[in-house]
Image (spheres, coloured by chain):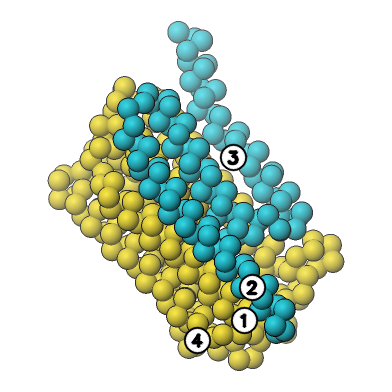
C-alpha cells in the first residue's frame, strides 16, 4: 500500500470520528427532546427527524452510500419504495375504517 | 475452485459479488423489519389513547440510551477494524474487532437485565400489545446482534482470520461485508430506540 493510499484512509478515519461525535450528540438530543412539553404528534416528528438524521449519517458515511455504485442505489431505492408502501398500509386501513364509520 | 468476482468487480454490476450479495440481503432485512415497524404503527393506531405511552413508561430510558451509545461505538470500532486492514495493520484490526465484540456483548448484558427486570415485575409479551411488539422487535434485533457476533467472532479468532496470510484482499472484503451488516443492525436500533422507549 502506498503512502498516498494510507493518507486517503487516514482522511476517512477523521470523517468516521467526526460522524461518531455527531451521533453521540444526536443521541443525547433525542433523549432531551423526549422531555420537551410538546404534543404527541410533535414529539413523534421530532424523534423521527433526529433518528432519520442519525440513520443517514450511518448509511452515508459508515456504509459509504454517498460514494457507492449506482447498482446499490437502485436496489435501495426500490426497497425504499416497497418499505414506504408497507408503512402506508396501516394508514390506509385506518382511513378506510374512519370513512366506514 | 475459486469463486469468481470475490475481489475484482463484475463488469456489468460494477461491484464484487460479496458486496452485491450483502446489499441484496440487507434489502430483504429492511423489508423484514419494515413489516414489523408497520405492525407497530398499526397496533399503535388501534390501541386505546395513551396505552402505548403507559406501557412504554415501564421501560428504562437510561439503559436504552447507554445501549444506543454502545452500539454506535461498535459501529465505529468495526469500521476502524476494516480501515486497519486497509492500512495492513493486522494487530490493530484484532484490537478493534475485539472491541466491537466487547460492545456487542455489553449490549446483550444490558438487554438481559432489561428483560429479566420486566419478567421479575410480571411483564411478559402477553401483557399488552405494546409489550408484544416490544419483545418481538427487540428480540429479533437481539438475534441479529448474536448472528453478527458469531460471524465477527469467527473472523477474530485464529482459525477464521488465517485468510489474512493467504489472501489479504479477500479477507479485507469479508470484514467490509460483515461491517455493512453490523452498521445495519445499528441503524435498526437507531429507530427502535425512540419509537419504543421515548414516544
Residue drawn 53% across the image and 60% down it = A18
Q: Which mark is residue A9?
A: 2
Contact check, label 1 and label 3, Cβ < 8 Å: no
Mark 4 highlights which residue?
Answer: B91
Q: Tell me, what hue is chain B?
A: yellow
- Dot 2 or dot 3: first in sequence order is 2
Measured Cα–Cα span from mark 2 to mark 4 = 17 Å
Does mark 3 fall on the same chain as mark 2? yes
Reading the image, the residue beneath label 1 is B87
Q: Position of residue B29 (x, y in %)?
A: 55, 52
Image position, residue A84 (x, y; %): 60, 35
Residue B123 shows up from this direction: yes
Tell me how far mark 2 sits from mark 3, CA to CA.
Answer: 34 Å
Q: Nearer the viewer, mark 1 or mark 3?
A: 1
Q: Where B37 sits versus B43, above or below?
A: below
Secondary element under disc 1, as helix, strand or loop, is loop
Quadrant in which the N terminus of chain B appears = bottom right
Report how far apart the C-alphas of labels 2 and 1 lie in the structure: 7 Å
> What residue is at 47 percent from the left and 76 percent from the top?
B96
Amino acid at each position: 500500500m502506498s503512502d498516498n493510499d494510507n493518507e486517503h484512509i487516514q482522511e476517512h478515519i477523521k470523517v468516521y470520528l467526526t460522524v461518531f461525535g455527531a451521533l453521540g450528540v444526536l443521541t443525547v438530543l433525542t433523549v432531551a427532546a423526549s422531555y420537551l412539553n410538546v404534543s404527541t404528534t410533535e414529539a413523534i416528528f421530532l424523534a423521527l427527524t433526529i433518528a432519520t438524521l442519525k440513520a443517514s449519517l450511518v448509511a452515508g458515511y459508515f456504509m459509504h452510500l454517498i460514494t457507492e455504485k449506482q447498482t446499490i442505489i437502485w436496489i435501495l431505492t426500490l426497497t425504499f419504495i416497497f418499505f414506504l408502501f408497507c408503512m402506508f398500509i396501516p394508514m390506509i386501513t385506518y382511513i378506510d375504517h374512519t370513512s366506514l364509520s | 475452485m475459486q469463486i469468481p468476482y470475490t475481489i475484482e468487480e463484475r463488469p456489468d454490476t460494477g461491484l464484487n459479488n460479496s458486496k452485491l450479495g450483502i446489499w441484496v440481503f440487507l434489502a430483504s432485512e429492511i423489508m423484514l423489519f419494515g413489516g414489523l415497524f408497520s405492525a407497530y404503527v398499526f397496533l399503535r393506531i388501534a390501541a386505546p389513547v395513551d396505552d402505548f405511552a403507559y406501557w412504554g413508561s415501564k421501560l428504562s430510558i437510561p439503559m436504552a440510551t447507554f445501549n444506543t451509545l454502545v452500539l454506535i461505538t461498535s459501529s465505529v470500532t468495526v469500521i476502524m477494524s476494516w480501515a486497519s486492514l486497509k492500512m495492513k495493520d493486522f494487530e490493530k484490526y484484532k484490537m478493534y474487532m475485539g472491541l466491537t465484540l466487547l460492545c456487542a456483548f455489553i449490549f446483550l448484558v444490558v438487554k438481559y437485565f432489561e428483560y429479566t427486570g420486566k419478567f421479575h415485575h410480571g411483564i411478559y409479551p402477553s401483557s399488552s400489545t405494546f409489550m408484544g411488539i416490544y419483545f418481538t422487535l427487540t428480540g429479533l434485533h437481539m438475534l441479529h446482534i448474536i448472528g453478527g457476533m458469531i460471524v465477527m467472532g469467527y473472523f477474530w479468532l485464529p482459525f477464521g482470520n488465517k485468510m489474512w496470510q493467504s489472501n489479504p484482499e479477500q479477507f479485507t472484503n469479508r470484514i467490509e461485508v460483515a461491517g455493512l451488516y453490523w452498521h445495519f443492525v445499528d441503524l435498526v436500533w437507531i429507530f427502535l430506540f425512540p419509537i419504543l422507549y421515548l414516544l
